[in-house]
């Protein structure tokens, strides 16, 4: 029995589930998927409407209120402009049907590869950060230490507060070395706190400076320096994805089955004031 008998929609669902488990930048809570809907092909787009501020006024008894103001509307477009694919084969000698874990592992590897591409794409949106929401620059990057790393997260939190970003649900994605600095700070890993206990258990996530802390090796950096540590709220970035196609087929000139797939996605920074960026060098 060949792989070609596998139902494509089942494979697609399995791969998308793997993607969502593997995402860091693209996971729900970091981004929003409010406009995902149906994605049929690359080039599809979603129109996003937003309403401008509404002014208030004092109401005086027995006095006419002002004429109604005209609402201002802004429209943005989320374009599904990213297309990534995979295509691999399994030789009959491997007896893939007798060892289904082999195909499962291959699909998982495909999911990881697609995850990296999507995460890197979202991580690169830091370039759209609003003026004033940055700490450090490429010319003068911050060099955090075990004593100051936590303090810089607090500073990022202040930037978001000054931009009226909701306090609950804030996140920050840091590289492994920065996370290591945080773990040396008793404020981050303090005995008896739920966050501290969680950090000691898995070493990858905790709470610091009002942020949910995530670690990723996809934090943008230039030649190992100038790491762009992005903090924000889910309202800042919208993301949509779909496994558009999974095709199992028999290779014509080989005794092998093959599987190919197409991943479509789009991402957009729709609220530049809802992220803040720290440019940091490793000491």
Image: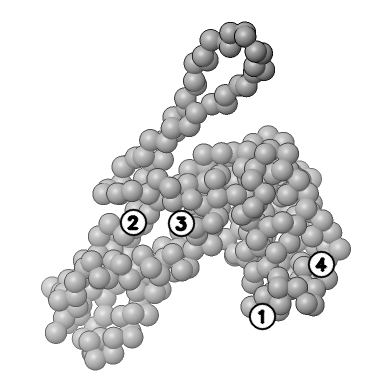
Distance CA(mark 3)–CA(mark 2): 12 Å
Q: Which residue is mark 4?
A: 187
Which residue shows up at 34% across the image and 74% down it?
Answer: 107
Rounded to the nearest angstrom, the CA distance separating label 2 from label 1 is 33 Å
For mark 1, what is the residue?
A: 201
Residue at 60% from the left image edge and 49% from the top image edge: 233
Residue denoted by label 2: 242
Q: Earlier in the sequence, mark 4 or mark 2?
A: 4
Q: Is residue 12 left or right of residue 20?
A: left
Residue on which the image places disc 3: 118
Which quarter of the figure is the C terminus placed in?
A: bottom right
Q: Residues within 10 Å of mark 1 (few under 14, many from 20)?
A: few
* Label located before the other in sequence (3 or 4): 3
Estimate the spatial distance between the alpha carbons at disc 3 and disc 4, rounded to whole Å. Answer: 33 Å
- Tell me what residue is drawn at x 57 percent, y 24 percent: 54
Mark 1 secondary-structure assignment: helix
């Amino acid at each position: 029995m060949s792989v070609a008998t596998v139902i494509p929609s089942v494979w697609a669902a399995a791969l998308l589930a793997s993607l969502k488990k593997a995402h860091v930048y693209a996971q729900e809570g970091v981004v929003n998927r409010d406009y995902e809907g149906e994605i049929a092909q690359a080039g599809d787009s979603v129109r996003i409407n937003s309403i401008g501020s509404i002014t208030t006024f004092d109401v005086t008894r027995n006095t006419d209120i002002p004429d109604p103001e005209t609402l201002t509307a802004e429209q943005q477009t989320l374009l599904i402009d990213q297309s990534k694919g995979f295509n691999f084969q399994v030789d009959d000698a491997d007896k893939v049907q007798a060892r289904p874990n082999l195909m499962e592992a291959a699909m998982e590897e495909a999911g990881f590869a697609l995850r990296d591409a999507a995460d890197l794409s979202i991580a690169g949106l830091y370039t759209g950060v609003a003026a004033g929401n940055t700490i450090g620059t490429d010319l003068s990057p911050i060099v955090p230490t075990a004593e100051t790393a936590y303090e810089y997260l607090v500073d990022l939190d202040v930037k978001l507060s000054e931009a009226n970003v909701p306090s609950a649900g804030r996140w920050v994605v840091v590289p492994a070395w920065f996370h290591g600095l945080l773990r040396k700070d008793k404020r981050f890993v303090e005995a008896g706190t739920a966050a501290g206990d969680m950090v000691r258990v898995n070493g990858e996530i905790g709470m610091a400076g009002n942020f949910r802390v995530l670690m990723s090796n996809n934090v943008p950096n230039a030649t190992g320096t100038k790491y762009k540590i992005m903090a924000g709220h889910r309202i800042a970035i919208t993301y949509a994805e779909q496994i558009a196609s999974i095709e199992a087929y028999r290779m014509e000139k080989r005794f092998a089955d093959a599987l190919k797939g197409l991943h479509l996605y789009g991402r957009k920074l729709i609220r530049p004031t809802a992220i803040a960026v720290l440019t940091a060098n490793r000491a």
